[in-house]
Image (cartoon, rainbow, N blue to C red):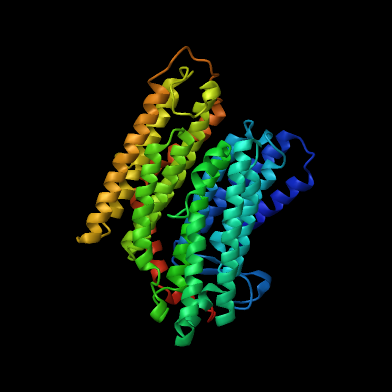
Amino acid sequence: MNHALILPLLVPLFVGALLLLCHRMGKPAKRILSLAATWALVPIAIWLLLLADDGQLRVYALGNWQAPFGIILMLDRLSALMLLVTAVLAGFAVLYACRGDDERGPNFHALYQFQLLGINGAFLTGDLFNLFVFFEILLISSYALLLHGHGQRRVRSGMHYVVLNLLGSSLFLIGVSMLYGLLGTLNMADLAGRVSAADPADAPLLAAAGYLLLVVFALKGAILPLYFWLPRAYASATAPVAALFAIMTKVGLYAIVRVFTLVFGSEAGTLSNMVEDWLWPLALLTLGAAVIGALAARNLQVLLAYLVVVSVGTLLAGVALGNDVGLAAALYYLVHSTLIAGGLFLLADLIARQRGDLGTDLISAPALRQPLLLGSLFFMGAISVAGLPPFSGFLGKVMLLRAIDVGPDAVALWAVVLVGGLGMLIALSRAGSLVFWRPASEAVGQAADPVRVIATLGLLLGSVVLVAIAAPLQAFVQATAAQLLDVAPYLQIIQGGAQ
């Protein structure tokens, strides 16, 4: 048994527990321990990515209890890719936090590690109930991180976030219970086989359970009409927390891909592709509504939060196409949008620190202390997130637009994506002109902390790196999409065929 699969869970689990037990240790020690643990996940994720690239499914049976009776972790190309994106994002975000944001409340670094535990567990689990468990771990940590720093705005946003996610968790538990009551298992691979062989009389209840799960994942993924909690929550969070939250919506989208390509995938008989007709209109409506929200935003952080929802709509469109080309385009765009969104949230905080009491409000303010540096970073991020060349957002959108055949759906996708891109460009141009080109007086802010600038630049340069490695990354995501749509190897987990 390859024990590497459990390392992304053990590292944050033990370090988070140690940080809680030794909460009286000095701030430098906490920061060093948290930085070391978070950045250690990067080589671990690269190692797992290289393992997964051979196309073989790897299973880790906790307690050596084999599937379907035991709890398993499952590594394929998709989970390995998500682990690496999370590790890189978290590494730069915690580096930024160590320059003072972690002092706004107690136990920041312990909560941060438990958040990573929940996210990594959600990507690795091969069991629906444990997907629920890891969802709860990451949500409980996110509740505390969202409130980190206190303040009336954070408390108000946090209450909305908590209530909605508690409702989502209740629906998740009901859906999982229905599946277990009908099929007697919650192992995803075993569910895939049993759904295909289920009694036709149970099909309506199985479909109801599937739609309940879709609602839950849509809430966590911020899909219309369940995304209204996100802009206010993300805009009120501290910068490193908002940056880490850039991966949170992707957890919901990951769950949609995993459950509805495996459990309700091609082997599910009459229930196969049961949500395909829903995902397409939801994707286009989410994208369009988010662009309108971005155009109406009067705060830079709110604008960036709506851009996260734009990325959700774009990703969902690729998934809704139902073919390997569209899914591959969505995965490439997922990597791009996560890193750039995280970098832009950090950049917004750098800008706010140089605008005095006005913060990120999009109104005229004193001149920035470092307009050239921050303006260059903003220009890079804006061009990339709007999908213009030569950055990775352009490549992701080109891959998506090429994934659909000529027809009415193609016209709708091209219109929404291109007009949406124009809308994002207008919103970002307006924000940039107010922040950088309309100073009202002499600069009052202090120069940006070099470490914070490095952390921000590290994430924004991800767009350049993704262009440089576009060919191998495109080959990898294409292989990932093909692996996801081929359910047969996953069914072998139950038959003892996976290692």
- Among all residues in the image, which is located at the extreme left? 406
Tell me if 464 is positioned left or right of 403 in this view. Answer: right
Q: Residue at x 51, y 73 (%)?
A: 209
Quadrant of the rendered image containing residue 435: top left
Q: Is residue 115 visible?
A: yes
Identify whether 58 is placed above or below 454. Answer: below
Quadrant of the rendered image containing residue 430: top left
Q: Residue at x 77, y 42 (%)?
A: 23
Q: Residue at x 52, y 35 (%)?
A: 455
- Among all residues in the image, which is located at the extreme top? 442
The N terminus lies in which quarter of the figure?
bottom right
Q: Position of residue 444 (x, y in %)?
A: 53, 15
Q: Position of residue 49 (x, y in %)?
A: 49, 57
Q: Residue at x 37, y 35 (%)?
A: 382
Tell me if 377 is positioned left or right of 24 in this view. Answer: left
Tell me if 43 is positioned left or right of 70 in this view. Answer: left
Number of numbered discs overlaid on the protein picture: 0
Q: Is residue 4 visible?
A: no
Identify whether 220 is placed above or below 152. Answer: below
The C terminus lies in which quarter of the figure?
bottom right
Q: Toward the viewer: 320 or 56?
A: 320
Q: Position of residue 479 (x, y in %)?
A: 38, 62
Q: Position of residue 415 (x, y in %)?
A: 25, 50
Quadrant of the rendered image containing residue 122: bottom right
Q: Toward the viewer: 488 or 446?
A: 446
